[in-house]
Structures are given as C-alpha cells and as structure tokens.
C-alpha cells in the first residue's frame, strides 16, 4: 500500500468523516516548554478515529459482500466504528464481544446498529466463534489494524495534520501517536512521509506495555509480557501487526512510554485547557508531550488524541485528583 | 450595523479564530426526537465564543488607541477573550475583576497577558474605578455585548453555522442560543437572516432569569428580579442590551428557559456523546434541545454551546449525578 491508497480513502471519507481541528493552548505550551498542537480524534464519530478505517474498509467491499455483512472482534472503539459505518453503508454487522464487557459499550454498539454476539472469555474461543459465524453467514472479517484498507482510513488523520500544520507554518515537528496494534500510527506515518516529510512520527504506549518501542529497537516483532493492568486498555495489544510493523519500522522514530498517572494528568489538563474529553489510552501521546518533554526534540510537538470513550467516574476521578 | 459588518469581522478573524465544527450524535437525536446539531464554541480560543468579538473590536481600534490599551469589566469569559486578543494584537489590557472572583479565572486572565485590577464588590464602585483608570491611562472600554464590533465578531458563529448547515442539507431549523446580554444571539440572528433565512433563532436562558424572553414578549426591555442563585452565572445579566435588544426583537422567535438541573444533564450527555466540556450557562441551549423538545418546532435543531470554562468539581459532580 502507499500514499495513493490514503488519498483514495480520504476522497471516500469526504462528507462522512468529521474533519477534526488542530487545537492549541498557551497554557499547554508553557507546560511542555514548546508549541503543542493537539489533533482531537475524540471528536470523531463514535468518539474515536476508528470510524475512519471502518468506513474505508466497508466501502471497499463488493456489493455482494456488503449485503452479506461484516464481522469484527472488539470490546471497544473498533466495535462502535464498525457498527456505525456498516449501518450507514446499509451492511449488517456482527460484533463479537466478551460477555464481561462494560454494559454501556455493549448497549452503544447495539444502538449503532451492530448485532452483538457475546462469548465467555474463560470458556469459549473467540476466533472459533467468529470463524463459524463468518462461514455460516458469509460475513467479511474486518480486523482492527492488520488490514490495508483500515490503515489507509486511519492515515487520513495524517493528511489532515499535514494540511493544517502547513497552514500554521509548521515545517518540522515531532508527531506523537497513541499506539496499540499500529494501524493509526502506520497510516499517519505513511501520509506524513508524502505530505510533510519534515515531520517525524513517534509511537507512544503505556509504561510496561511498550511492545512497539521494543520492536522498533530490536528490529523484529516483540510481545508484551501481559495484557492487563493498565487503565490504557484501549491501546494494549499483544504486539504490533504483521502489516503495520514494517511500515512503523521504516518510518517511525523511537517509541515513548508513559505511566498511567501521567495520562490522568493529561486528561485533566485537556479538560481545563482544550475542553475536550480524552480516554486514558488516547491520552498517552499528550501525556508524553506535556510531561516527558526531555524525550522530544525541537520547538514543536503534535500530539494525536485517539479517542474519548471514558466512563464518567474514571473521568471525574482524574479531574478530582489532578485539579 | 448589518451583515457587511459581520462579513468584515469574519475576514478579520480568518487565520486567528478557530473554526468550530458542527457535531452530531445519533444518541442525542434519539433523546430529542429530531436531528440535533451542536456548534461547540467551548473549543474556541480561551474556551468561549468571546474571543471572536474581542478580536474584532480590538482590530477596529486606531493604532494610537491600540497602543494605549483597552479595559474591560468581567469576571469570566469576556475577560479571557479580551486579554488574549489584546496580547495577540500587541495592546495592553486592563481587566477589572471582583476580588472574590475564582482564583483560577484571575490567574488565567493574567497568564493571557491581562493586567488584573481587583475591586471590592461590597465597598467599591466598579464603574468609577474603570472610568478613572480609562481616563488616567487613555484606555478604550470594550463592553461585553453592547458594542457593534463585538456583536459583529460573535455573528461570525452564525456565518459558520449557515455554511456548515447548508453543506449538511439543512434548509429550515430552529437555532437555540444561550443568551445573556444578547451579543452572541443578536450577531447570529443577523448572520442567519442574510445567509440562512429559513433558520429561526431562539434565545435560551436559565429558569428564573428570563429577562430576554420576557422582553421579547412585552416588546420592551425587562429586567431580572435578581442576579444570583443559578449555576449558569456566565449568562446572567440584568437585561438585554440597548444595542442588542432591537436586533433580538426584530429577528428572534420566542425565548426558552431551562432549570439548572437540565444543564447538568446536558453537560453529562455531551460528555458521553460528543466528548466536549460545557460550562453550565453554555449548556442551556443544548438542554432545551434535548429535554424541552415540545417547545421546539420542526425536525431539526441546532444548539450553540457558548463555552466550556467550568471547574473540575462542578463538572465531576454533573457526571456523577447524571451518569
């Protein structure tokens, strides 16, 4: 895949995606000691960037495939992105979710038009359930990041950043991106390679779950020793993807990682200074920009905020703790 | 003043103002029973629409006036808008604030470059202090709403709404606007009269502080019996302005009013569904759109959110109470 795929995705998203602005605050500049620009994909449909990749992937299906429907595994943002994009395209969608997923996420996915199939995380095999459903009903599986159409869709965030940053006179900057499987990060990196070659992308992960940073360092796919124990659950994946890692390896600078507590501080700072709602995993890049300034070069940083789907009590807790 | 003043203000704001998007959520549509569009001026510089009018008013000063500086009375959003716009224009700004104003608002105004002069609400006369300072130092007073350049600046919100709504195929709709002195509401009404004549503006106020609604009904300026006792403090003014009221009277539909509690519910709904932060007074229009649907005609409503400068504990309380 290449930049043409991202440009095609961008044309396909026109009129459907929400073009998010690039936000600033002199108060955040002061904390970071450099100019800070924030790309708030929490303002995207369904509250995360995932809608972009979902829309593009579904739009690439044949009429017959679309009529049969799509299937996705997700307890979170990918589920909602797929459900909404599929509904808009007139495609049925089946979302396989663990039965212990938060009630609200299950309800939201259903309300967006997804058929939710629950499975028991302990006793059932998700992949087997999914494969059986897909084969019985002729559904097309849409993976959350290891899918070129999904990567191209997420890459449209990078095209927007390039255009918006140019209009603001930015020629050289670090671009920090919250990184799970690497779909968003690799898409943005490909877009910026073409449209803003002076920009350098750095993936950001929760401390202790830095599989991507370690993979970039060793040059091959490394895995996380565990998959729970952080509030940043939305971006914790076992390892970078087979499709995303070669792109990350070719284009990204070194990875950063931040402790959970700094994500809560960044959420509170964004509440106070930008008036946006960020979920913990989506706050890692802003947290790095604000509180780990020594790891960033240059006088400018762009931080991508990847989503805002956080429960009220968690958000309220962050505001109370870091007023 | 007329539409040309608003178009000129819009040209003057280009490259300086943040163009805010028009947000939607199917979940909000379901609550309201019609399509809901939200114009989030909480995402504007300094967290409220006030920056628009401040920038335009300051840009209309002569070089000599700008060099001398400006003065404003405000304990809130107008203060921050003036301080930031003045700093950007290289003008000194003096903001007269009550000494019991929240510490954070005083600090923010200072950090944005404003010189804060505190007065004792009980024992000192604000107008006298301001007049003396203005005369001693040759400062130009910029009123928060009764100033045509300010109204023209706020009216640019209306130009954006017209363009964005047209792109979404909206030809006829109610437009609900949080209304204090009427600067924002009259500016938007003037812009829509020219650019979207099928749109009807309705001012929205806190219950018990409906001076504008009563003034529209009686045809002359009515006053509020009291000026405190609502969490919507940012939009409580004694009465509509001498300059704004004739515009409101000519162009607006009837006023709506909502109880404080519905503002908190709307803040929580916007947190969950739009991922934006709204302050109580700025939530009145969305509260009316969502929870007072019987008072609105048609299949579409646009609600303006005028700001997001709310303290963490108040916001956390809204999320906890209306999860």
Image (cartoon, coloured by chain):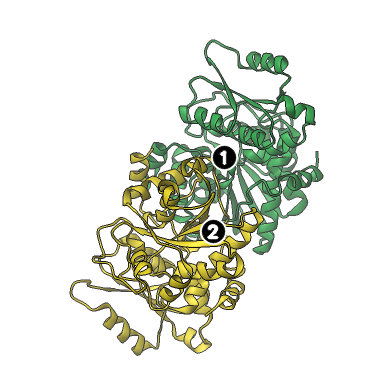
Chain colours: A green, B yellow
Q: Residues within 10 Å of mark 1 (few under 14, many from 20)?
A: many
Q: Position of residue A294 (x, y in %)?
A: 54, 50
Judge left or right: residue B315 versus residue B162: left
Q: Can you say whether A151 is above or below B199 in the image? A: above
Q: Position of residue B228 (x, y in %)?
A: 25, 62
Task: Using the image as rendered, state which of residue A175 and residue B218 is in the foreground.
Answer: B218
Residue A1, numbered label? none
Judge left or right: residue A4 versus residue B139: right
Q: CA distance from mark 1 to mark 2?
A: 23 Å
| Residue reaching furthest to the top | A123
Q: Position of residue B123 (x, y in %)?
A: 18, 75
> Dot 2: what SS?
loop
Task: Using the image as rendered, state which of residue B10 and residue A253 is in the foreground.
Answer: B10
**Picture residue at 67% right of the left edge, 47% below the top:** A157
Query: In which quadrant of the rendered image does the N terminus of chain A lie?
Result: top right
Residue matched to label 2: A24
Picture quarter containing residue A227?
A: top right
Q: Residues within 10 Å of mark 2 (few under 14, many from 20)?
A: many
Q: Position of residue A150 (x, y in %)?
A: 71, 36
Q: Can you say whether A120 is above or below A79 in the image? A: above
Task: Using the image as rendered, state which of residue B44 and residue B232 is in the foreground.
Answer: B232
Count of numbered circles on the image = 2
Q: Chain of mark 1?
A: A
- Give whichever of discs 1 and 2 has the lower sequence position: 2
Task: Using the image as rendered, state which of residue A186 and residue A34 is in the foreground.
Answer: A186
> Dot 1: what SS?
helix
Task: Please tell me whether mark 1 or mark 2 is closer to you in this view.
Answer: 1
Residue A46, numbered label? 1
Q: Chain of mark 2?
A: A
């Amino acid at each position: 895949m290449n930049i043409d795929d991202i440009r095609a995705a961008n044309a396909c998203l026109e009129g459907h995606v929400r073009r998010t602005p690039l936000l600033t605050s002199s108060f955040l500049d002061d904390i970071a000691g450099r100019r800070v620009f924030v790309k708030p994909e929490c303002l995207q449909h369904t509250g995360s960037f995932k809608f972009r990749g979902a829309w593009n992937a579904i739009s690439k299906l044949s009429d017959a495939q679309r009529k049969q429907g799509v299937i996705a595994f997700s307890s979170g943002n990918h589920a909602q992105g797929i459900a909404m994009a599929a509904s808009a395209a007139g495609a049925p969608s089946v979302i396989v979710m663990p039965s212990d997923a938060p009630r609200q996420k299950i309800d939201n996915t259903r309300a967006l038009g997804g058929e939710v199939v629950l499975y028991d995380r302990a006793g059932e095999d998700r992949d087997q359930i999914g494969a059986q459903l897909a084969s019985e009903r002729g559904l097309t599986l849409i993976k959350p990041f290891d899918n070129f159409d999904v990567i191209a869709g997420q890459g449209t965030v990078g095209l927007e950043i390039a255009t918006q940053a140019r209009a603001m006179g930015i020629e050289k900057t670090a671009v920090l991106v919250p990184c799970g499987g690497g779909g968003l990060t690799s898409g943005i990196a490909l877009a910026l390679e073409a449209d803003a070659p002076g920009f350098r992308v750095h993936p950001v992960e929760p401390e202790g779950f830095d599989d991507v940073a370690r993979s970039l360092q060793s040059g091959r796919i490394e895995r996380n020793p565990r998959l729970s124990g952080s509030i940043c659950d939305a971006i914790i994946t076992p390892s970078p993807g087979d499709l995303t890692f070669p792109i990350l390896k070719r284009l990204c600078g070194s990875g950063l990682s931040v402790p959970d507590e700094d994500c809560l501080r960044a959420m509170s700072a964004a509440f106070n200074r930008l008036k946006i709602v960020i979920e913990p995993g989506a706050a890692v890049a802003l947290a790095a920009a604000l509180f780990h300034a020594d790891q960033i070069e240059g006088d400018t940083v762009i931080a991508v905020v990847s989503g805002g789907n956080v429960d009220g009590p968690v958000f309220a807790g962050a505001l109370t703790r870091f007023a």
